[in-house]
Amino acid sequence: MEVPLWFALAAIGYLGCKLIRPPLWLVLVLLLGGYLIADSLLAPVIDTAVK
């Protein structure tokens, strides 16, 4: 099953907000960091881990 990275990040952010209730700024930083890492040299590693 192939899951798009943006969908996985959104699902993790949503579940994290519902279950753990972290500050909103922390969720936004983690989502932005995930987006930036996806466009870096680590993208192939993340792609194989998600697939």
Image (cartoon, grey):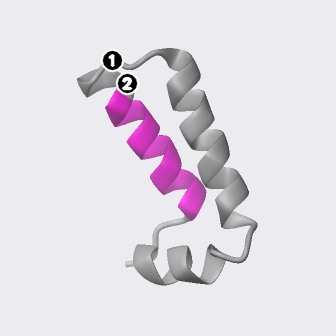
Image: magenta residue range: 5-16
**Residue 40, placed above or below residue 12:** below
Q: Which residue is mark 2?
A: 17
What is the quadrant of residue 31 in the picture?
Answer: top right
Mark 2: amino acid: Cys
Residue 7 lies in the magenta stretch: yes
Q: Which residue of the protein is positioned furthest toward the left in this rendering?
A: 19
The residue tagged 1 is: 21
| Residue displayed at 67% across by 53% down | 35
Q: Residue at x 46, y 55 (%)?
A: 8
Q: Is residue 33 above or below residue 27?
A: below
- Residue 16 falls in which quadrant of the image? top left
| Residue at left offset 61%, top offset 33% | 29
Disc 2 crowd, CA 10 A, few/some/many (<14, 14-19, 20+) = some
Out of 23 and 6, give the one closest to the viewer.
23
What's the distance in space between the residues labelled 2 and 1, CA to CA? 5 Å
Q: Residue at x 48, y 84 (%)?
A: 48
Q: Measured from the top left, where is residue 33 in percent x and y? A: 64, 47
Secondary structure, mark 2, is helix
Secondary structure mostly seen in the magenta stretch: helix
Q: Is residue 47 left or right of residue 22?
A: right
When the figure is inspected, residue 6 is found, relative to residue 27, above or below; the finding is below
Q: How many marks?
A: 2
Say what secondary structure mark 1 lies in: loop
Question: Left or right of 20: which side holds 49?
Answer: right
**Badge 1: how crowded within 10 Å, few (<14), some, or many (20+)?**
few
Name the side, left or right, on which 1 lies relative to 45: left
Which amino acid type corresponds to the residue marked 1 in the rendered image? Arg
Residue 36 is situated, as x and y percent measured from the top left of the image, at 72, 55
Quadrant of image for the N terminus = bottom left
